[in-house]
Amino acid sequence: MAFESLTDRLAGVFKKLRGHGKLSEADIKAAMREVRMALLEADVNYKVAKDFCAKVSERAMGQEVMESLTPAQQVVKIVNEELTALMGGEEAARVQLKSKGQTVLMLCGLQGNGKTTHAAKLAKYYIKQGHHPLLVACDIYRPAAIEQLKVVGGQAGAPVFVLEGEKPPVIAQKALSYARDRGYDIVILDTAGRLQIDDVLMQELVQIKERVEVDETLLVVDAMAGQDAVNVARTFHEKVGIDGIILTKTDGDTRGGAALSVLAVTGKPIKFQGVGEKLDDLEVFHPARMASRILGMGDVLSLIEKAQENADEKLAEETARRMMENKFDMNDMLAQFAQIKKMGGASAMLSMMPGGAGIDPSQVDEKSLARIEAIILSMTPAEREKPEIINPKRKRRIAAGSGTRVEDVNKLLRQFEMMQKMMKQLKKSPKGFARRLSGM
Ligand code: GDP
């Protein structure tokens, strides 16, 4: 799961701090050294990590923390705020669409980073909002790329403009007039990718921009490439000029370096993130939510949003309410199962829950979803409400009834207990919870 080791490392630093009661300057210094190490290990750019820790230290040495009754918590709060700032601040950076005429989005990036997939994801994202996007095949060098765009475009429900025998700048220009004539309001250019940065490729992108008025140039970079991704972004920005970044594969085993460094290094924000291979796996990038996810505080807002997007609204609201009131039990979980599947599976959902980041995703991967469902189905409604009443004999029965092993039942119960504990902790501090909800 993404950011897992960074999350663990930071949790370790904060745990140590909490053990200290009042904090001395030396405590904070030691903690910041560890935070810096954790960031470097997560492949964050060296200067970014250094500046970040300097900023946090300065604030943490201030009165606000030293005189606080809960200094460790204050430090966590500062780290959260600074992580948010590092990735762009409270407000998500969004692609600006024109209210009239065609908005032209040019996607560029290295091969294999997810450009074509994200062209289609964007098309689908805008179709859901009532727009009429047109996909344009500007990667004329690889016939397979055009075919791929046609396939994913078809899946997204967006037409694909293909023009053989022309150069990409001309294709872009003709696509734009085609869009104008037929009333498409968003034109998404899927440009050629290369294995490495090369000048011919850059030149071609510049030429497209000279031919048509590109409203946003979006660079598609693979989060798993860490600092390499950041260097690629810097070069693209210097040579072509970009307006924003689509960070892909954040669902993978990324350490976080790219997400945390790219804005500081290029001055350009991440606007979207890819969270899976499916066309629905695209999210607006919210720095505050990402920060609290990295800190293992969950991302309740994204969870609620996802629920609203995919589930029937009443159920989503009820679930969100029960979660906040700490009443979410296994009956709810069962009722949510169909929705959970729609929301990208249990591991995706758990990763967004407070404390969920601490759960081993291999224990809740998509394959075990059916098993979990079977286990819960074998419980009585009363047991689902209060799993603690389940005794060893019942555990054996439940395992037999669901075709699983007692270990599986135990595992699920432990995970659920962990989740409830985290929710309880949040409930104890409603102010903190509200702050987290608003991204602090
Ligand atoms: P392009 O060469 O840049 O156009 O890259 P593609 O769009 O062909 O994507 C390369 C591979 O990455 C494909 O197998 C995609 O399914 C996969 N991919 C793209 N975006 C994501 C993502 O957000 N998450 C995951 N897990 N895989 C992705």
Image (tube, helix red, strand yellow):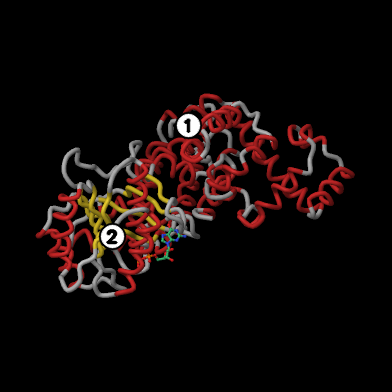
N-terminal of the two: label 1 or label 2?
Answer: 2
Q: What element carries label 1?
A: helix
Query: Residue 64 in the image: x percent, y percent?
Result: 43, 28
- The residue depicted at 82 percent of the width and 49 percent of the height is 401
Indicate the quadrant of ligand 1 in the picture: bottom left
Above or below, 424 against 413 in this view is above
Q: Does residue 194 appear to the left or right of 174 in the view shown?
A: right
Query: Residue 345 in the image: x percent, y percent?
Result: 57, 50
Q: Does residue 273 appear to the left or right of 188 in the view shown?
A: right
Query: Residue 144 in the image: x percent, y percent?
Result: 34, 73
Q: How many angstroms separate mark 1 from mark 2 (CA)? A: 40 Å
In this rendering, the label closer to the viewer, 1 or 2: 2
User: Is the N terminus in the top left, top right, bottom left or bottom right quadrant?
Assistant: bottom right
Above or below, 432 against 306 in this view is above
Closer to the camera in the image, 350 or 127: 127
Closer to the camera in the image, 284 or 176: 176
User: Is the C terminus in the top left, top right, bottom left or bottom right quadrant?
Assistant: top left
Query: Residue 308 in the image: x percent, y percent?
Result: 48, 35
Residue wearing tag 2: 160
Q: Quadrant of residue 256?
A: bottom left
Q: In which quarter of the image is residue 250?
A: bottom left
- The residue depicted at 32 percent of the width and 57 percent of the height is 119
Q: What residue type is labelled 1?
A: Leu
Q: What element carries label 2?
A: strand
Asked if the residue under mark 2 is in contact with the one under mark 1, i.e. CB atoms within 8 Å, the reply is no
- The residue depicted at 49 percent of the width and 46 percent of the height is 31
- The residue depicted at 67 percent of the width and 41 percent of the height is 418
Q: Does residue 305 appear to the left or right of 324 in the view shown?
A: left
Residue 437: assigned label: 1
